[in-house]
Image: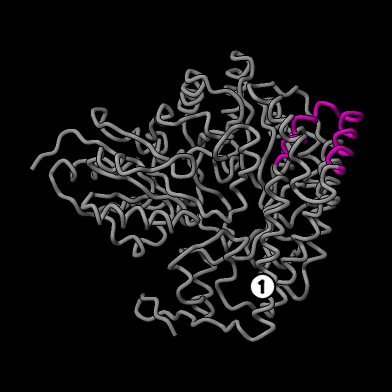
Amino acid sequence: MMTETCKVLMIFPLFNANSFWNYKEACDLAGARYPAAPLGLVTVAALLPRDWEVRLVNRNTEDLVDADYDWADMVMTGGMLPQRNDALHIIETCRARGQPVVVGGPDVTSSPSLYSAANFQVLGEAEEIMDDFIAVWHSGVRQGMFEAPMGKTDVTKSPLPRFDLLKLDQYLHVGIQFSRGCPFSCEFCDIIELYGRVPRTKTNAQVMAELDALYALGYRGHVDFVDDNLIGNKKALKKFLPDLKRWQNEKNFPFEFSTEASINLADDADLLRSLADTNFFAIFVGIESPDTDSLVLMQKKQNTRRSLQQSIETIHKAGIFVNAGFIVGFDSEKGSVAQGMIDCIEDTSIPVCMVGLLYALPTTQLTRRLLAEGRLFSGSEQTQSGDQCTAGLNFETKRPRRDVLNDYRTVLAAIYDPVAYFGRVRRLGRMLGRKRAHRMIKDDLRSFVRLMFRIHRAGPGTAGQFWRMMLDCALHNPRALPYVVMTSALYLHLGPFSRQVIAEIDREIADVDQGRWHVPPVVRHVKAELVPV
């Protein structure tokens, strides 16, 4: 039976509520509902036949109702690990209704067996396999698996995302993508497993077309390059940035950009200058640990070849502020790592630090090693109730588990104390070498007024530290004011969130102390199967 047209309901699953990344209070200040828009789904939407009707419901920003399901011939869903619980719920709902459901994205690609209830699984990058799926759907078949080879997709074939499906005013920022893949081989990272170690880049014209589309839709402000390492292919990036700068000049700089990059960005003064000139204002850097032994073990040697403090200062002085990731729980930790990590964060003056407990993600080198050593806990792959802040250590640690947990809560308590946090913001404000003034967009002033009246909600002593920092920045580097305000707004979430995580970790420590925590069964490998021991 041939099926010509189709009504497709795309559902972006809920992220777990207990997440470092949800920034609810900061969203509310700006009148947004969630930080980031679902770029993956609107890209897949662009791969569908033009005569198919598509609706998008983001469960993080709007309600999903029965009428949405009733309208659709097919449901498409999927996402990342912290969305797993809701994605499985959506699949269960569709199957109960007898409605075909397709699942894709990084989590099903890593753990397809968990999503076996879906009618269709699309594993890997979708660009070169969606035609096969569409042909099967047209033929009337309602079950199947489609798999792309890892890291091989030609991203120059990636279509212009269907940004028109987004309610752009619901988000703090909108994402675009220049490259996929990362040249490094960090043991704990699944990016290199999903997208490969050879960064593949879109053409300059492709990215310009995406920016043109956003501009034509009336969007202005923060655009995030979602690349896992924007500088993974420096040669291509250096050819791209002049075109991006020309576009920004022609349009009077409507966008400010953020991205993720490796710390060796600080080694290339010309590239750093080009990013700043193009109006990049923030990057996320995975520092992970200040301990050289840990960096070597995790195969993140690029972080050992330089002074972290000097590198971060170089990036700040170029006018780009750094957010960073840190991890507690590596095998190489010889003793307490808390003070060393606290000192590193203070010395580098990085306000926003995603400090997490090590989590063995599916398909990573770390997971394969722990499995071979008989240390990976059984059952940890079935559900995911938090991010690394609350759901880490899904394996038997080399150090006593209590010591790892105590280090973690010690770091969080220290760095998210308001005196420490706003002290780092104050030092950042003095260093940040912004050459271009922030372009005021709609609601900026209203957001600041809201922040003034709400900053005290982040905890005792916060308001005083905030105003001390603001005065210091106004006196010493007023061009940095919009950016220290952004960073301050995040503390409305980070302050209370850190205390919530600390309370949860304290309960885990109490369970260990009182004998209520027992080592779960581990997994062993038998004939390519994972078997509980």
Residue under the image location 72 percent in, 76 percent down: 403
Position of residue 381 measured from the top left corner of the image (x, y, whole percent): 45, 68
Q: How many marks?
A: 1
Position of 423 with respect to 353 (left or right) is: right
Position of residue 256 measured from the top left corner of the image (x, y, whole percent): 64, 28
Q: Residue furthest left?
A: 1
Query: Does the magenta portion include 432?
Result: no
Q: Residues within 10 Å of mark 1 (few under 14, many from 20)?
A: few
How is this picture coloured? one colour
The correct choice, above or below, for 18 with respect to 128 in the image is below
Report the amino acid beneath label 1: Arg
Q: Overall secondary structure of the magenta stretch?
A: helix
Q: Quadrant of residue 332?
A: bottom right
Q: Nearer the viewer, residue 348 or 478?
A: 478
Residue under the image location 73 percent in, 51 percent down: 495
Q: Quadrant of residue 156?
A: top left
The correct choice, above or below, for 46 with respect to 460 in the image is above
Residue under the image location 31 percent in, 33 percent down: 54
Q: Nearer the viewer, residue 25 or 347?
A: 25
**Which of the image's four quarters has the N terminus?**
top left
Residue under the image location 87 percent in, 36 percent down: 430
Q: Quadrant of residue 294?
A: bottom right
Residue holding disc 1? 507
Position of residue 35 measured from the top left corner of the image (x, y, whole percent): 57, 40
The answer to whether residue 236 is visible is no
The correct choice, above or below, for 66 with respect to 173 in the image is below
The answer to whether residue 101 is visible is yes
Magenta-drawn segment: 464-489
